[in-house]
Image (cartoon, rainbow, N blue to C red):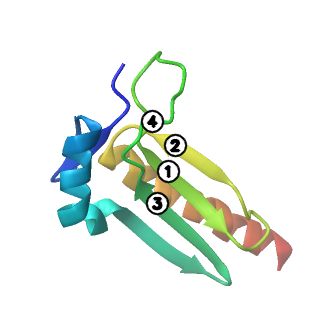
Amino acid sequence: MNRWYRLDGHTPVACTPEEWDDWAVQKWPVSQVAKTEIDGAEVSTVFLSLDHSHSGHGPPLLFETMVFGGTLDGEMRRCSTWEEAEAQHETVCEMVRAKLNRQS
């Protein structure tokens, strides 16, 4: 089971820790998929570069969306691909907006 990944464009590629280190020095800023501020809360989606599935079953979990602040502070979701991460980011943003609308 490989745990380390780097990005080739938007595609995660398995690599050794040494290969990741070389990539990270040059390319790490590409780890941000999206960041959205919504009325005092921030929704951030990033490439983790380390498989967070921890079970060894199923696809690697390489992207994370998290809410910082607001009533959904700490809400977190993980997925496997850049495309899933973009969709996940929008879903979580919609959740934050819906929560705000219910409170108004």
Point out which mark residue 61 bears: 4
Q: Is residue 27 above or below residue 82?
A: below
Residue 11 as seen in the image, left or right of residue 45: left
Q: Is residue 63 above or below residue 29?
A: above
Q: Earlier in the sequence, mark 4 or mark 2?
A: 4
The residue carrying mark 2 is 78
Label 4 SS: loop
Point out which mark residue 45 bears: 3
Q: Earlier in the sequence, mark 1 or mark 3?
A: 3
- Under mark 4, the amino acid is Leu
How many residues crowd mark 2 within 10 Å: few (<14), some (14–19), many (20+)?
A: many
Label 2 to label 1: alpha-carbon separation: 4 Å
| Front one among 37 and 9 | 9
The quarter in which the C terminus is drawn is bottom right
Tag 2 and tag 3, C-beta contact below 8 Å: no
Point out which mark residue 64 bears: 1
* Residue 35: % across, % down: 46, 72
- Under mark 2, the amino acid is Arg
Q: Earlier in the sequence, mark 2 or mark 1?
A: 1
Figure quadrant of residue 58: top left
Tag 1 and tag 4, C-beta contact below 8 Å: yes
Label 2 to label 3: alpha-carbon separation: 9 Å
Tag 1 and tag 3, C-beta contact below 8 Å: yes
* Residue 103: % across, % down: 84, 74
